[in-house]
Amino acid sequence: MNSPTELADTSCGFIALVGAPNAGKSTLLNSLVGTKVSIVTHKAQTTRSQVRGVVTQDQAQLVFIDTPGIFAPKRRLDRAMVDSAWGGAGDADIVGFIIDAERGITPDIDAMLEGLANISHPKILILNKIDTIKNEALLELSQTLNEKLRFEATFMISALKGYGVADLMDWCVKHIPPGPWHFPEDHLTDLTMAITAAEVTREKLFLRVHDEIPYNCTVETESFKIQKDGSYKIDQVVYVTRDSHKKIVLGAGGQTIKAIGQESRKDLMEMYEVPIHLFLFVKVREKWGDDPERYREMGLEYPHGKN
Ligand SMILES: Nc1nc2c(ncn2[C@@H]2O[C@H](COP(=O)(O)OP(=O)(O)OP(=O)(O)O)[C@@H](O)[C@H]2O)c(=O)[nH]1
């Protein structure tokens, strides 16, 4: 028989956050981790690959996976994002299905419920944005969804305001399997600093330029150097697909790209607490959406086959 010291006293579990675009997955991940690890915008499909946020509490380590919103894929990039989201759900110990309670049940939610039914891991229902709807509507929504699929538990939260997030965390702590931790205790995310920095700039780009342009853009960190004085020198490229988009991203006299750079730099300085020297370049690469290398940079598998 094992002596008490031989028994694993730590636990570790992966919890995938899946749901429709804009349901609030990234906001929830950041709220759970207590810092910004995943970018958030009001535009759908902001998160492109899996982002992991790690919370270590007493003996338990929770690894939350923010997945791209699941939607009907049209372009190659969309397909890669959907594959990544379902991959995240299939690999997890617990799957958290997040619903924008204000939007309620839409046809895409029904399609996702069908997909979730094929996943055997425990599933929990997370009704988000409760700050926007009335209690009766919330209870009705919870009942309808629980009749459609078996969930181990239902949480009613506001990721933005932090309501209910601690209860969700406590439940997860109690339901993850025993086992060694995957990450050091002070680890918050598995994104490298270079990728995180590119994501922060992409967030600012999404917020600054409107309509379809952001979806045709990607940001890559070309070089990330820690200088002798402790500051970081970061060179990034914004790839766009057309010359006309380049003009918009640059703005008159380079004003737009300058503002994007200033906002990104400010966030990065707050995150890393060191001076940041950020240099942004805009390049036209017509077919970046068909270039396997760009997908690797985003942490996505390149889906072969036609667009
Ligand atoms: N009112 C309200 N808004 C929220 C809440 N949670 C998230 N939002 C907003 O909803 C929008 C989408 O949030 P995200 O966290 O980016 O959503 P997501 O599910 O990660 O989106 P994708 O990256 O498209 O998959 C943002 O404008 C958030 O501020 C909430 O609890 N209440």
Image (tube, grey):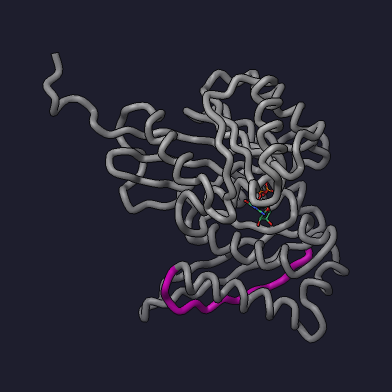
The question of residue 172 being in magenta is answered with: no
Please say if 211 is above or below 62.
Answer: below
Which SS does the magenta portion mostly show? strand
Q: Is residue 174 left or right of residue 84?
A: left
Task: Name the residue at 60% across, 52% down.
Answer: 297
Q: Position of residue 45 (x, y in %)?
A: 72, 49
Looking at the image, residue 72 sits to the left or right of residue 48; the answer is right
Instruction: Specify whether residue 265 is in view.
Output: yes
Q: Is residue 302 visible?
A: no
State the quadrant of the N terminus.
top left
Left or right of 92? Residue 218 is right
- Please give left or right for residue 270 compared with residue 18 in the image: left
Q: Which stretch is magenta?
A: 272-284
Tell me what residue is drawn at x 77 percent, y 41 percent: 76
Q: Quadrant of residue 200?
A: bottom right
Q: Farthest residue in the right direction?
A: 244
| Residue 34 percent coordinates (x, y) | 45, 56
Residue, far front: 136
Q: Is residue 30 above or below residue 64?
A: below
Given residues 300 and 255, the one toward you in this image is 255
Frontmost residue, 234 versus 257: 257
Q: Quarter-wise, where is residue 59 in the image?
A: top left
Q: Which residue: 49% across, 35% down?
A: 15
The C terminus lies in which quarter of the figure?
A: top right
Residue 130: x percent and y percent?
Answer: 64, 46
